[in-house]
Amino acid sequence: MLIIVFRVLLIYIIVLFYLRIMGKRQLGELQPFELVITLLIADIVALPMTQNSMPVLFGLVPLTTLVLAHFTLSLITRKSISFRRVVNGKPVVVISPNGIQFDALKSLNMNMDDLMEGLRSCNYYKIEDVEYAIVETNGAINVIPKSESSAVVNQDMGIKLPPASLPLNLIVAGKVIGENLQTSDLSLGKIKEILKAQGINQIREVLLLTLDTNGKCYIQEFNMQGKTFNIEYNGEGRW
C-alpha cells in the first residue's frame, strides 16, 4: 500500500512540474497539439500510478518524450508561420459585413447553434449587432461589433479618470501578506491605523483588505458587508 502511495505522489509531483514548465494556458485556450499532449499525459501516467508490476520509469520516459515534443513543436511554431498554420490552423471569419459565412462554418464543422452560443458568450445576442466574428485557432470566438452597437466608453464621453490599478491584497483571512505590504511601502503600524479608522481593532477580524495605487481600499470583516474608502497614498506607478 505504501508503495502505491509513493508512486502516486512521485508521478503527481513530476507531472505537476512538467505542466508548470509547459505554461499556464487554460484548457479552452490550448492549441490542438497542446490538447493532444495533455490528453496523452493523462493516459500515460495512469498505469504506472496503479500497476506495481510496471516500473515507474516506463511511465516517466514517454512522459518526458511528450514534454520534449511539446517544446520542440512550440519552438518550431514560434519560428515558422507556415508550420504554425499547418499545426494550429488560422483564424476564420464566420460573420462579415455581408452576413454569416456559411462555407466558413462548414469548414470548421460548426453549426448555427454553435455560432449563436459563441456570440452570446461575447454578450452579443443579435446577428445584426455584429460587424465581424472570428473563430480563433483555439476555438474561441471574438467579435467586432458594428459602430452603432459598440459600448460607450469614458473616452467617448470626454470623462477623465485616474489610471486603472491592480489592487494589492494586504490582508487575507486575518493574515497580513508581507510581500504585498512591502510592495505598497506601508508599515504594519499604518495598516493598524487604517483598520482603527474603520472601527476594526484586530487584524484577525479582517477577511480582506486591498489597496490600489490611487489610494482606494476595499475592506471586509468576517461575516460582514464589505465597503470601499480612500486613504492618502502616493503610490502611482509603484507596482
Image (cartoon, helix red, strand yellow):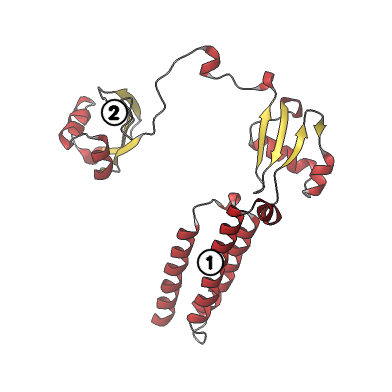
Q: Name the residue nearer the viewer: 120 or 213.
A: 213
Quadrant location of the C terminus? top left
Q: Which residue is mark 1?
A: 67
The residue lying at 79 percent from left, 44 percent from top is 105
Q: Secondary structure at mark 2?
A: loop
Residue sticking out furthest to the front: 79
Q: Name the residue nearer the viewer: 75 or 6.
A: 75
Type of the residue with mark 2: Gly
Residue sticking out furthest to the left: 189
Position above or below: 167 against 48: above
The residue lying at 65 percent from left, 56 percent from top is 32
Q: Secondary structure at mark 1?
A: helix
Question: Callout 2 environment at 10 Å: few (<14), some (14 to 19), or many (20+)?
Answer: some
**Residue 81: x, y in percent?**
65, 50
Position above or below: 44 against 32: below
Number of numbered callouts drawn: 2
Q: Name the residue nearer the viewer: 180 or 195.
A: 180
Residue sticking out furthest to the top: 158
Dividing the picture into quadrants, the one containing residue 111 is: top right
**Residue 46: x, y in percent?**
54, 73
- The reply to whether the C-beta atoms of the residues labelled 2 and 1 are less than 8 Å apart is no
Quadrant location of the N terminus? bottom left
The residue lying at 74 percent from left, 38 percent from top is 93
Residue sticking out furthest to the right: 103
The residue lying at 60 percent from left, 61 percent from top is 73
**First reached walking from the N terminus: tag 2 or tag 1:** 1
Residue 222 appears anywhere in the view:
no
Type of the residue with mark 1: Val
In the figure, is residue 234 to the left or right of 85?
left
**Residue 201: x, y in percent?**
18, 33
Q: Which residue is mark 2?
A: 235
In the figure, is residue 79 to the left or right of 133?
left
